[in-house]
Amino acid sequence: MEHFLELKRKLALTLSLAIAVSLLVAFVVNYSVSKNSIINGLVNKELPLTANAVVADLNDER
C-alpha cells in the first residue's frame, strides 16, 4: 500500500512539473510573438505615418 502511495505521489509531482513547464513555455512563446507583432506594427504602420507627417510639416514651412 505504501508503494502505491509513493508511486501516486511521484506521478502527481511529475504531472504538476510537466504542466508548469508547459505553461511557462506557452507564456514565453506568447510574449515573443506579441512583442514581434507590436514592433512590426509600429515599424511598418505607425512610423511611416509619423515620417510622412514630419515631411509634410517641413514642406508647409517652406
Image: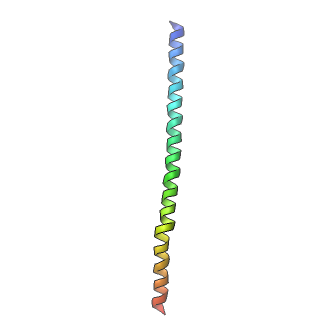
Seen in the picture, residue 9 relative to 20 is either above or below; the reply is: above
Q: Nearer the viewer, residue 40 or 28?
A: 40
Relative to residue 44, is residue 17 depicted above or below? above
- Name the residue at the top extreme: 1
How many labels were placed on the picture?
Answer: 0
Q: Quadrant of residue 10?
A: top right
- Colour scheme: rainbow
Q: Residue at x 46, y 69 (%)?
A: 46
Q: Is 44 located above or below residue 10 in the figure?
A: below
Q: Residue furthest bottom?
A: 62
State the residue in front, 17 or 48: 48
Query: Residue 11: x percent and y percent?
Result: 52, 20
**Residue 27 at what x, y percent from top left?**
50, 44
What residue sits 52% from the left and 56% below the top? 36
Residue occupying the point 50% across, 6% down: 1
Image vertical order of residue 23 relative to residue 48, above or below: above
Q: 8 and 52: which one is in front?
A: 52
| Residue reaching furthest to the front | 44
Residue at 49% in and 32% down:
19
